[in-house]
Amino acid sequence: MVVDRNVVLKKAENLLREGKLDQAAEVYVWLVELRVDISLDSTLRDGKAQLADAYLQEDRGVGGRAISEALLDHDPGSEAHIGRLVRGQIWSPDR
């Protein structure tokens, strides 16, 4: 199966803009699970960051926190990821 990652990422981005968070999450998860290409690494991280932001904007801290933790594991010095993680912890019902 040939996957055009740009088309898939654009689809997920459009779903986020339309407020269809669950559908966008499914697209991102599907793409991550495919592990299509090592060069996708930074593109996928950017997509994960957008997804985490969308979760946090919708007050869905658990999802935002989980993604933020993974992003922070990869880039521990990122202030943006630290900020996402803090917001996710604040908004999580299990804090």
Image (cartoon, rainbow, N blue to C red):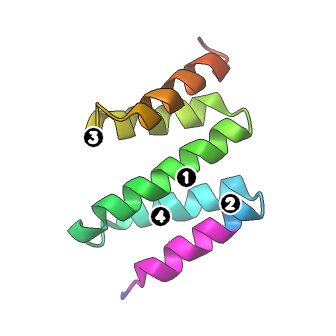
Identify the element where label 4 is drawn.
Answer: helix
Indicate left or right for 37 with 4 as reference: left
Q: CA distance from mark 4 to mark 3?
A: 20 Å
The residue furthest top is: 95
Which residue is labeled 3 in the image? 74
Q: CA distance from mark 3 to mark 2?
A: 24 Å
**Label 4 or label 2, whichever comes before in sequence order:** 2
Hey, what amino acid is under mark 4? Trp
Q: Secondary structure at mark 1?
A: helix
Q: Which residue is mark 1?
A: 50
Q: Residues within 10 Å of mark 4 (few under 14, many from 20)?
A: few
Sequence-first disc among 3 and 1: 1
- Residue identifier under label 4: 30
Q: For this rendering, which residue is in front, 35 or 11?
A: 11
- In this rendering, the answer to whether 22 lies above or below 7 is above
Q: Which residue is mark 2?
A: 16
Callout 4–callout 2 Cβ contact below 8 Å: no
Who's the residue at 30% across and 72% down the image?
Answer: 36
Nearer the observer: mark 4 or 2; the answer is 2
Q: Amino acid at mark 2?
A: Leu
